[in-house]
Image: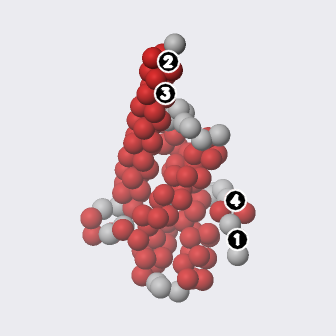
Amino acid sequence: KKFMSEIVVKPKTSGMYFTQETENAIIEYNNTTDFDLRSKIYRERIHYAFFKLTENIIHTFKFYYTDTNTIEDLKHEVVTFLLEKLHLYNQSKGKAYSYFGTIAKRYFIVFNNFSINLSCTISDQSLHNL
């Protein structure tokens, strides 16, 4: 078995990371119950798109404030979260790119708000203890 950290991220040659092929792979992933096939589809056709989507959202919206040790750890958390939500995608309700981009942005917003509130609470408590 390969773990997420062992997955080789292969760059796409076209420069586009989330294509119709990615959406087709997500649909295929959701339509099969074969664990080995799902694993292969994810590793070879979906993971890179999720990784790049997460990376681009972090840099575009400046989601740098984090309680994780590194940005790489944060990317891994969000990619894992997207994988957990993969089965919820319904192609009749829109494009996979929009769906997973929205999920990732909402995750970052909630995560950042929680981290900021936690830091403020800790700082406020520290001030009261002086």
What colouring does the structure picture have?
secondary structure
Cα–Cα span, label 2 and label 1 = 48 Å
Q: What x and y, as percent, mark residue 2?
A: 70, 71
Query: Which numbered tag is attached to residue 129?
Result: 2
Left or right of 73: which side holds 129? left
Q: Name the residue under label 3.
A: 122
Q: Which amino acid does label 3 sit on?
A: Ile
Q: Which amino acid does label 2 sit on?
A: Asn
Under circle 3, the secondary element is: helix
Local packing at callout 4 (Cα closer than 10 Å; few below 14, some 14-19, many 20+) is few
Marks 4 and 1: CB-CB under 8 Å? no
Q: Nearer the viewer, mark 2 or mark 3?
A: 2
Q: Which of marks 2 and 1 is in front?
A: 2
Cα–Cα span, label 3 and label 4 = 32 Å
**What residue do we see at 61% from left, 69% from top?**
43
Counting residues from the N terminus, which is met first, the one under dot 2 or under dot 3?
3
Local packing at callout 1 (Cα closer than 10 Å; few below 14, some 14-19, many 20+) is few
Counting residues from the N terminus, which is met first, the one under dot 1 or under dot 3?
1
Counting residues from the N terminus, which is met first, the one under dot 3 or under dot 4?
4
Q: Mark 1 points at which residue?
A: 2
**Quarter of the image where one finds residue 23:** bottom left
**What residue do we see at 44% from left, 67% from top?**
86
Q: Which of 46 and 6 is in front in this view?
A: 6
Which quadrant, please, contains the N terminus?
Answer: bottom right
Q: Nearer the viewer, mark 1 or mark 3?
A: 3
**Image vertical order of residue 18 relative to residue 111, above or below:** below
Q: Which of 104 and 9 is in front in this view?
A: 104
Q: Which of marks 2 and 4 is in front?
A: 2
Local packing at callout 2 (Cα closer than 10 Å; few below 14, some 14-19, many 20+) is few
Q: What x and y, as percent, mark residue 34?
A: 53, 86
Under circle 1, the secondary element is: loop
